[in-house]
Image (tube, rainbow, N blue to C red):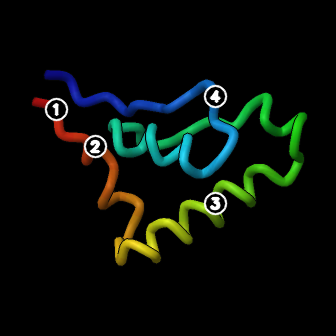
């Protein structure tokens, strides 16, 4: 199995969207069109991710990358 970085692209409008990509294995996400709707979206997503991790006592974003369990 090749180890290649995964970048989540498409539909990221809020922190929850980005977190879904991270949990599925992405090591980065792209915010595109959302910037036209809300120029502050990048800051909003970063703050949202930090808040979510803090509320769950998760020390680092890297702790959730690829955390999705498939059966």
Which quadrant would residue 34 be assigned to in this image? Answer: top right
Q: Residue at x 63, y 60 (%)?
A: 46
Which quadrant would residue 58 be assigned to in this image? Answer: bottom left
Mark 4 neighbour density, 10 Å: few (under 14) some (14–19) many (20 or more): few
Label 4 or label 2, whichever lies nearer to me, is 4
Q: Is residue 66 above or below residue 32?
A: below
Counting residues from the N terminus, which is met first, the one under dot 3 or under dot 4?
A: 4
- Identify the secondary structure beneath mark 4: loop
Q: Residue at x 83, y 39 (%)?
A: 35
- Identify the secondary structure beneath mark 3: helix
Residue 9 point in image, percent of width and height:
57, 27
- Mark 3 = which residue? 46
- Mark 2 = which residue? 66
Counting residues from the N terminus, which is met first, the one under dot 4 or under dot 2?
A: 4
- Mark 1 = which residue? 70
- Mark 4 = which residue? 11
Counting residues from the N terminus, which is met first, the one under dot 3 or under dot 2?
A: 3
Whether residues under marks 1 and 4 lie with C-beta atoms below 8 angstroms apart, the answer is: no
């Amino acid at each position: 199995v090749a180890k290649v970085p995964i970048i989540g692209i498409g539909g990221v409008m809020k922190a929850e969207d980005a977190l879904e990509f991270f949990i599925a294995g992405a090591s980065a996400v792209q915010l595109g069109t959302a910037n036209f709707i809300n120029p502050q979206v990048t800051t909003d997503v970063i703050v949202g991710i930090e808040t979510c991790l803090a509320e769950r006592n998760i020390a680092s974003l890297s702790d959730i990358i690829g955390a999705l369990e498939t059966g």
